[in-house]
Amino acid sequence: MRLLVRFSIFSLILVLCACVQHTNSTENDISNQADLEKVAVQYAEGFDILYEEGVIKIVTQSFGKNAFFKDSIYVRLDSTVKLDPVCKTIEQETIRFACQSSTHLAFLAELNHLEEVVGLCGLEYVNNPEISEVLKKNLVVELCMTDQVQLENLYQSNPDLFLIYPFGSAESNNYNDKGIQTLLISEYLEKSQLARLEWIKLFGVLTGRTMEANDYFEEVETAYLALKTAATKTEKTFIMNLPFQDQWFMPSSKSVGVELIEDAGLQYFYQDELGTENKTHSSEQVWNDGVEADYWVIIARRSADYSLEDLINEEPVYKEFLSVKKHQVIFCNTNQVDYFSKGAIEPHVILKDLCYATGQIDSHEPQYFFLLE
Amino acid sequence: MKVRSDIPLIGLLILGIIILFWMNLLFGDVRMNTEDVFNLLTGGTAENSAWSYIVESRLYRSLVAVLAGGALGISGLILQVFFRNPLAGPGVLGITSGASLGVAVVILGGLTMGSVLGNVGIILAGIIGAVVVLFLLLFISKYIRNSVTLLVSGLMFGYFTAALINVLFLWANETDTREYVVWGLGSFEGLSSTELAIFSSLIIVLSFFCFLLVKPLNALVAGTAYAASLGINVKSTRLLIILITGILAAIVTVYCGPVGFIGIAVPQLIRVLVKSKNHAVILPAVFIAGSFLALGADFIVRMSSNTLPLNTVTAIVGAPIIVWVIIKMNRINVSF
Amino acid sequence: MLAFNQLEIKVGKRHLFAAEHLNITNGIVALVGRNGTGKSTLLKTIMGLHDDFSGEISINGKALEMFQPAELAKEIAIVYSKSAIFGSHSGRDVLMLGRLPYQNVFAKETTADRDQVNQIIALLQLENFIDEEYTVLSDGEKQLIMIGRAVVQNTPIILLDEPAAFLDLVNRHKLMEVLQNIAKSTNKLILFSTHQVDILPKVCHAVLLIDKNRLQLIEEPGSFKSTIYESFGINNLESDEV
């Protein structure tokens, strides 16, 4: 069944590839649009922007072995350009968005395009008061009362484009059948923070704010690389997170989260473990290793006044952890900061937090991560 | 003579428990040698300061498994004899669901296991839920003599409470919901020393109370009318049975989550395997077999680095036992 | 042995029957009455399981209310018309249940218990099937075992609630033989409810008749049949059952 779906998507893609009619797409044509600010993709592997006459084609696709999907949409700049009706087409700058992820929201917010958001999954979990304010004011529709997208709510929000995750690709196909245009957004599959951030350029094309997107990316990239270069590589190790029942989900050594901490000069305790999936460790394994690891980076929902003592109360063995003994527990309280949304587009801020927490920077006001006292 | 012929089985089960218990202490994701484990158990130290906590946690969860498995076993046995139904058990009759609903109300209401108040509140809520379901079943069984109908009623209680819990989710916040979902997977892990003390003392005391039920249970195999003629006070026996099975099932459910299959498979199996018809033998045999099965299931869970939920393992082990016993017992008249 | 004084039994608001003063002596006594007249209720009342009565029931001069359930179990045993055992008990295990009132809290079997069981097995000639599983036995064999269990209970009174209801003709005869056998070798009161009238003069020394809301004792075997038929308003003396 899944194979069949994949095959049909593949066939659809073949059709989409031949969408633009009567265009002699050459380098010359593109050079005619000299005034157009363009996007060049440096880091990201999951999307591409192609410039054709009067249109910009956005392609998002899987890379690596774990998934297979491909999607594309035409952003029409010139209304006279004719496109095959089977192609997904939208007009730039008039797009109203529905988002399946709050990360999508962060990109749109950064580009000052929040007003055009009409639907969102997980409205109640937006914990940035300013963004929440705007969404409330605009009567943005909650799309996922449960963990699934509710079609009626989606229709009610009436978006021009629904930004969705690539998993459950059969589902995405359905939306198109039901008259809702979608675009697969897979920024979280990127292998590095900067590649992930670079997706802002795609959002720039969609919202007609390419220049702002390019500028923002460049600014963050510069700041990030500068911090990374300045960071001193150490032998200090770190473990991550807290257990769920008796299971401890440790991110893969290849994950962007781990890469970010490594960029601050630390070494992941489980860096020798291969694979891109999160790996489950039993509590006793992590207890055993926690005694040796220098740092402990925790991203969790806890009360505002959460302290090192509260952490030890959760499990007495934690007081044997080297990180706890040395007061080197680096904590991000997702109850208070917008780590999963805004954090995704501020890797330079997070990196600076980490450098500060590890004592490499003297003065800094931590935004996401701080040392637990 | 008959009691003596059951001694090899009981001895074998006890030996099995000892071996599994030791294996549970010895093996795990962190490798320790026998010497280290022995050292730590006798209050010594090891090179890694976390190891004493690891051994302690292995010891606690093994103790919890032994007691929880035994409690579920005898609770199921008593219910099977009382309702004269080989398919009865705390899970099937909806007693665990009743306890779950009680727990859900408290957890989703924001109280956690961390505090003493939370502990007491959750235990009480679980017991109330379980006992309420038992009284409802008793009420129904007065009007409906058909034992299949009783089982269906129990299943309906289960569905109904599960639905109520889903409704409760609407008002609960994410953390509370998650805590409840985790609890629902079932696990013998994670009891603090205080919780273990409460848990074990309650179960041990109640298990001894079960010996008051030896004669009533022996008589009840012939039905309540005959039991009454044999000098059993049916009314007080009924109350005692409801309280003991309800509280046992509720305590296990509160601390370990709704653990399935042990409460139905173990009594069935033991009633077939044990030759004595005296519950003074059957009750301890069921307790021991329940401990053995729970400990074995937990060993498998631990060998999977806790990736397999406990209920998955008990289902894989328990369901075939139930089917086997049903086939073996198909001659026996299930109804009145 | 068993005596009723000014007894009046009710079920809810319905008045079932009354008796002035009846004294039932040891031996085999039949309880006869049409459906719904209250035979089972009378037996239940004697068992102490039906409270809705006035007057007095006494066993050897001691009022029924004065007995604790455990004491009563040493006075009265009962056999119902159909019995089911939950479990894979052998006939011998079922017989042993009769010793329960005499056992300690752990229901420990004593040598005396086992001797008693063996004795009754011999008395009732149950050897052929006593070690079979109870649930696979025939209805006749099951009933014999339940009677054996009642005898093992070693009570001065045995009540039987339509013991022959599910038995064939041969087994009914055998049942009566067994009851006579028990009465002969033990000095008990055996009170059984029945619809078979023809056998009564041969088997019983008295009949308890419930009719027209009245419980009466007929002690003259020669007049059993005529009194019962007259009372029921039946003329046809050919009929064996009522």
Image: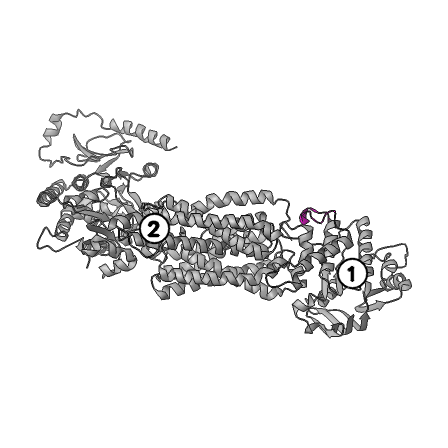
Cα–Cα span, label 2 and label 1: 70 Å
**In the rendered view of the protein, which quadrant contains the N terminus of chain C?**
bottom right
Q: Residues at badges 2 and 1 in contact (C-beta under 8 Å)?
A: no
- Residue B189: give x, y in percent of width and height: 37, 53
Q: Main secondary structure of the magenta part?
A: loop
Region of the chain picked out in magenta, as a range: C127-138
Tag in front: 2 or 1: 2
- Residue C76: give x, y in percent of width and height: 72, 65
Q: Is residue A84 left or right of residue A38?
A: right
- Residue A66: give x, y in percent of width and height: 29, 34
Q: Is residue B3 left or right of residue A59?
A: right
Crowd around label 2: few <14 · some 14–19 · many ≥20 (10 Å)? many
Crowd around label 1: few <14 · some 14–19 · many ≥20 (10 Å)? many
Q: Is residue A230 visible?
A: yes
B228 w.r.t. A197: above or below: below
Q: Chain of mark 1?
A: C
Q: Which residue is mark 1?
A: C192
Residue A363 drawn in magenta: no
SS for dot 1: strand
SS for dot 2: helix
- Residue type at the position of mark 2: Val
Which residue is depicted at the point 76% across and 57% down? C162
C23 w.r.t. B290: above or below: below
User: What number is the disc on residue B37?
Assistant: 2
Which residue is depicted at the point 78% across and 72% down? C3
Q: Chain of mark 2?
A: B
Residue C133 drawn in magenta: yes
- Residue type at the position of mark 1: Phe
The quadrant in which residue C26 appears is bottom right
